[in-house]
Amino acid sequence: SNQPLKLSVIGCGYLGAVHAASMAELGHEVVGIEVDVEKAEALAAGRVPFFEPGFSELLRRSLDSGRLTFSSDITAARGAAVHFLCVGTPQRRGEYAADLTYVESATAALLDVLGPGELVAGKSTVPVGTAARLAELVAERVPDAVLAWNPEFLREGFAVQDTLHPDRLVYGIPDGAAGEWAADRLDRVYARIVAEDTPKVVTDYATAEMVKTAANSFLATKISFINAMAELCEATGADVKQLADAIGHDDRIGRKFLNAGLGFGGGCLPKDIRAFMARAGELGADQALTFLREVDNINMRRRIRMVELARQVCDDSLLGKRIAVLGAAFKPDSDDIRDSPALNVAAQLQLQGATVRVTDPQAGDNVRKHWSQLDFVETPEEAAENADAVLLLTEWKLYKQLDPAAFGRHVRTRRVLDGRNALDRETWEAAGWTYRALGRRNV
Ligand code: UDX
């Protein structure tokens, strides 16, 4: 049936906030539970604590409908038909493994209010085996409640679209009648999405947990594959962009995620592949994932190579050179700077004696807060003032649309390093710039 349900969403960070508002958009009555009182209040007032295209409109719409509320008090979740666990699982400090502190504390809090006939649906990315353990805790406390694992695949920058129109639904459920009941309840939550013939995989807990980490590992591997090819292209004078186009025409390979450059960062891919390796080790299957260590290494080497290229182009010394860094977010259309390749490169340049100015259209607040040692400016023109080299490190549209001739008037020397293979080489060269890029002929 298409009856709206009462839902709770526990943890209103990036994933939870988007999920909560999206579920209200689907017609459900949703309460978002967030321990950070300030964050809960901001969301309740329609203020989005991060940048995500289209999200602030969705949040306001959901709040205005009266179907979405926020609270810092777990008792507000009482009586919900489904409780979604959306807390973060960051990388543990100094280790590869995931930090499950928030999963543990959220589950403990939820167990105090969980009632019979209610479903707990985990959405966080967790080490395989976590769901089975949480299911035992649920069964001990509330024998008539059920746990399902329902991973989320949203991309930053496309979070709303990915949540309302996902590529697939994955339900990890227990065997037997309890499992069928859980799948049926999730179908009711996602009725509109199910009706759009969205592919659905109904499976066991471990598979559902692994779908997420396997998908992210594959994406990371695809990026590192093309970046390894970029290293070879640099060694031979071949062109990685044309190579990617050519192999991408084979639809078994596909062109997506074959953009060579500075590599991947963000709050998911790096920590997910590391946590996956750590978990494989615990399970005695570490050999199966040793290739992911190489994927990580290739990815980190791109950052070093970028700094090297900057030094080369600046007459072999960065000391006292003025460098403009365009981009700080780990990817465009996001203000997220977690494990940002761009900031890592900016910091390395500074350590080698360069005077670095960083700019980004959205990540300014985060950079000032977490990277106060870097000089942040608002516009690319300010960053480029008297620069000896300009580095494009996050491929914002704004930067791709710069007019190289006009922009060139700000710099001291027209040298541009394209860390994302995003600029049109010919137009920049025609405007008198020396163009260098990762994985391309650099003469
Ligand atoms: C990723 C997954 O795509 C998503 O399905 C999952 O739920 C969470 O992790 P996200 O971290 O938002 O999403 O970013 P994504 O668009 O996947 O990009 C990840 C990183 O890879 C970025 O740093 C991006 O710049 C880089 N990237 C991506 C490349 O370097 N080359 C590419 O071809 C594609």
Image: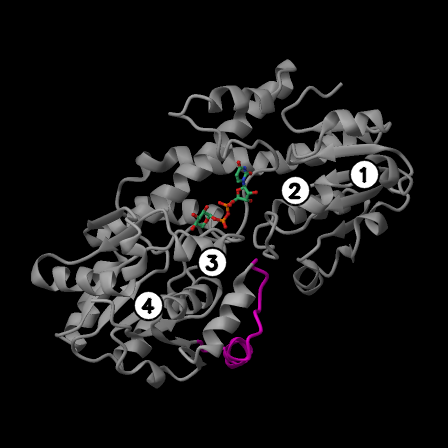
- Lateral position of residue 307 relative to residue 154, left or right: right
440 lies above or below 325 = above
- The residue that disc 4 covers is 84
Rounded to the nearest whole Å, what is the CA distance between mark 4 and mark 3? 17 Å
Residue 355 image offset from top left, x and y in percent: 83, 47
Earlier sequence position, callout 2 versus callout 3: 3
- The residue that disc 1 covers is 403
Check residue 283 for magenta coloring.
no
Asked which secondary structure carries label 3, the reply is helix
- The residue that disc 2 covers is 395
Rounded to the nearest whole Å, what is the CA distance between mark 1 and mark 3? 32 Å
- Lateral position of residue 276 relative to residue 189, left or right: right
Earlier sequence position, callout 2 versus callout 1: 2
The circle drawn on residue 160 is: 3
Asked which secondary structure carries label 1, the reply is loop
Earlier sequence position, callout 2 versus callout 4: 4
Which span is picked out in magenta?
34-53
- Lateral position of residue 313 relative to residue 78, left or right: right
Q: Is residue 101 visible?
A: no
Q: Please give the name of the residue rendered at 11% of the width and 64% of the height, measured from the top-left corner.
A: 178
Decide which of 314, 247 is in the foreground and name it: 247
